[in-house]
Image (cartoon, helix red, strand yellow):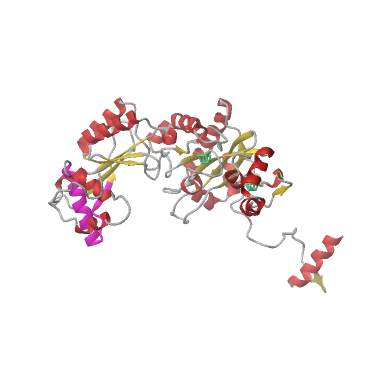
Amino acid sequence: MLKGEGMTKQKYDTSLVDELIEGEWPSFIADLKQLGERKPQVEQLLGQMNQSYKDLWNYWQGTVLNVDGYGGGVIARYSELSDEYPDIAQFHTIRIIPPSGWVYSTETLRELCDIWDKHGAGIIQLHGMTGDILLLGTDNKSTYEAAEDLMEHGWDLGGSGGALRTLSCCVGEARCEMACFDTIDLTTHLTNTFISQLHRPEFPYKYKFKLSGCANDCSCSMQRSDMPIIGTWRGPMQIDQEEVAKFVQENGSDYVVENVITRCPTDCIQLKDNQIIVDDDNCVRCMHCINVMHKALKPGKDRGATILLGGKRTLKIGDTMSSVLVPFIKLETEADYKKLTDLVERIWDFWGENGMDHERVGEFINRIGLAAFLEGIGLEPDPQMIKHPTTSPYIKFEELSAPKIDGEPVHDPAIRNEEVESVESV
Ligand code: SF4
Ligand code: SF4
């Protein structure tokens, strides 16, 4: 439907939310109004939303509602204005695990729409922050009926609370030439292996996996998950020099220098005589040059992934991005997958035993220190476990004992630097 088309007069004041229909872009208010013509709860939802905008107050109260056998998956919402809006007195959301990589057939989407039209308000969000399919607007009784109907059709509830959350991944090898491992297969494997931890909260707080096939990180795993798994490669990048020459001919060498060579973060790529030369030891696999010259350059052949840990939104210590835990792991065989799931279990055991209530794993590491954490999970420290690149422009030397004058230590940095230089020159 076009913006605002076919709307009928509403019983409830929607003057403020109506303003969101104006403007260039399609508006969810226009869609909800259309839906409200046959779903009274949606009409009342708009009325309460308008009231919230007017009073600057959120009239939803949250609580827990569980389907038998599950400890999560339903986000229960009760309206504080149920006298005025009785049809949204209960307006719960059901989280559903989507197909890995979000690959749907139209048949599947129609099935979901039909189920939700039957049991709920008909509002579907693809996809929520965690990656779930969100089915919005149902009451207590219909929640159970909808869950049964969904399960009969092969769908399953997603995670919520102190549990493993629904996994998400980029489309990976299914459609993308950059992928360094099969993101869809591993996401399905991890979901099936840890389905119990997903359905029954047993952790100090939530735990999210997101998988990206390469450092372009299309699943935003670095910012949005506790454990990002990001594809990378070892050894040399693949270079097709014929394609390099074609690219230079079509775009000019200045373009290549300006858009590829000078933008390499480690200055490890050169263009010489229309050929690309990469110093692979210093390449940090950032993907930039490959993104620009994707026919000429490709990730290397020895592919796998880097496992990171600790990303999350604001809680006890503010927003954090994940940092490297395992610099490289192969992800091709059952045995490779087993190594990964064993590591995950060791992390959960140690964090579960020692983490505080509502403490994400990144906050836990921040509290006890990385050294204690690595010892706890039985992982050797590695120089690549860095939180972020160094911000200090100074070279760090070994600590020397302070030089002494008349037997007294001298803390004057100028004198100490002289001492250091003399030691270095020896
Ligand atoms: Fe492709 Fe990489 Fe994006 Fe995945 S993260 S879709 S592999 S570019
Ligand atoms: Fe440089 Fe990144 Fe290309 Fe490596 S992948 S050569 S670090 S631009």
Please, which residue is most extreme toward the front here?
250
Question: Is residue 89 visible in the rendered structure shown here?
Answer: no
Q: Is residue 288 left or right of residue 9?
A: right
Name the foreground residue: 342 vs 139.
139
Magenta stretch encompasses residue 152? no
In this rendering, the answer to whether 179 lies above or below 11 is: above
Report the residue at 58% width, 46% height from top: 292
Report the residue at 12% width, 51% height from top: 11
Give the dominant element type of the magenta stretch: helix, strand or loop: helix
Question: Is residue 286 visible in the rendered structure shown here?
Answer: yes
Q: Quadrant of residue 262?
A: bottom right
Report the residue at 46% width, 47% height from top: 224
Residue 188 pos. (x, y %): 46, 30
Q: What range of the chain is rendered magenta?
A: 39-62
Q: Quadrant of residue 42?
A: top left
How many numbered marks are there?
0
Report the residue at 43% width, 41% height from top: 203
Name the foreground residue: 139 vs 411.
139
